[in-house]
Amino acid sequence: MGKDQFEAGLEVRRDVLGADYVNKSIENADDFTRDLQQLVTEYCWGEIWTREGISRKTRSIINLAMLSALNRPHELKLHVRGALRNGVTKDEIKEILLQSAIYCGVPAAIDGFRVAQEIINIENE
């Protein structure tokens, strides 16, 4: 890993989460958070999201399910937006969250629906 992985990760991260959000995250990094931004961009986005084994759409679907299971609404919000950019439909998001109700619990699914609906409504404006 290194500069090439960071640059590759930055490109994918911007494509999925939006350049404004990512640029703001990088620009707002300080001495405390800069290393985390570097790690996330290189390792998560540059090493994993650039792999060819599965599509970005599939990665988004997996992320929605895992973030629902982990009850991480802030990250879920980001990844709902990214999933829509990666071709996951509103109906597919609904099905993912319904599936999570069974395996992760109804409270997690309710929160997931709440977060997803907020983003879907914004994206539809």
Image: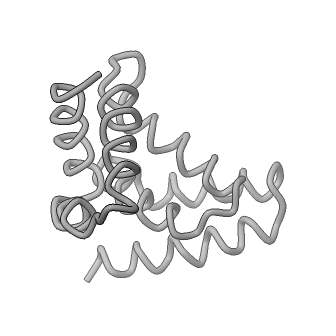
Residue 19 position within the rendered picture, expressed as x and y whole percent measured from the top left: 16, 59
Task: Relative to 27, say whether 63 is above or below.
Answer: above
Q: Residue at x 22, y 35 (%)?
A: 6
Colouring = one colour
Task: Relative to 106, say whether 122 is above or below.
Answer: below
Residue at the extreme front: 31
Left or right: where 57 falls relative to 18: right
Task: Relative to 124, say whether 68 is above or below.
Answer: above
Residue 80 position within the rendered picture, expressed as x and y whole percent measured from the top left: 44, 60
User: Based on the displayed image, in which of its 4 quarters is residue 33 positioned?
Assistant: bottom left
Q: Residue at x 33, y 17 (%)?
A: 52
Total numbered badges shown on the rendered structure = 0
User: Based on the displayed image, in which of its 4 quarters is residue 97 positioned?
Assistant: bottom right
User: Based on the displayed image, in which of its 4 quarters is residue 90 positioned?
Assistant: bottom left
Left or right: where 29 falls relative to 58: left
Residue at the extreme top: 53
Q: Nearer the viewer, residue 2 or 110?
A: 2
Residue 103 position within the rendered picture, expressed as x and y whole percent measured from the top left: 82, 49
Identify the image quadrant of the N terminus.
top left
Q: Nearer the viewer, residue 39 or 87?
A: 39
Identify the image quadrant of the C terminus.
bottom left
Left or right: where 27 falls relative to 78: left
Residue 37 position within the rendered picture, expressed as x and y whole percent measured from the top left: 34, 51
Left or right: where 87 falls relative to 5: right
Q: Residue at x 32, y 55 (%)?
A: 34
Q: Nearer the viewer, residue 120 or 24?
A: 24
Q: Nearer the viewer, residue 85 or 4?
A: 4
Q: Residue at x 18, y 65 (%)?
A: 27
Task: Relative to 62, say whether 84 is above or below.
Answer: below
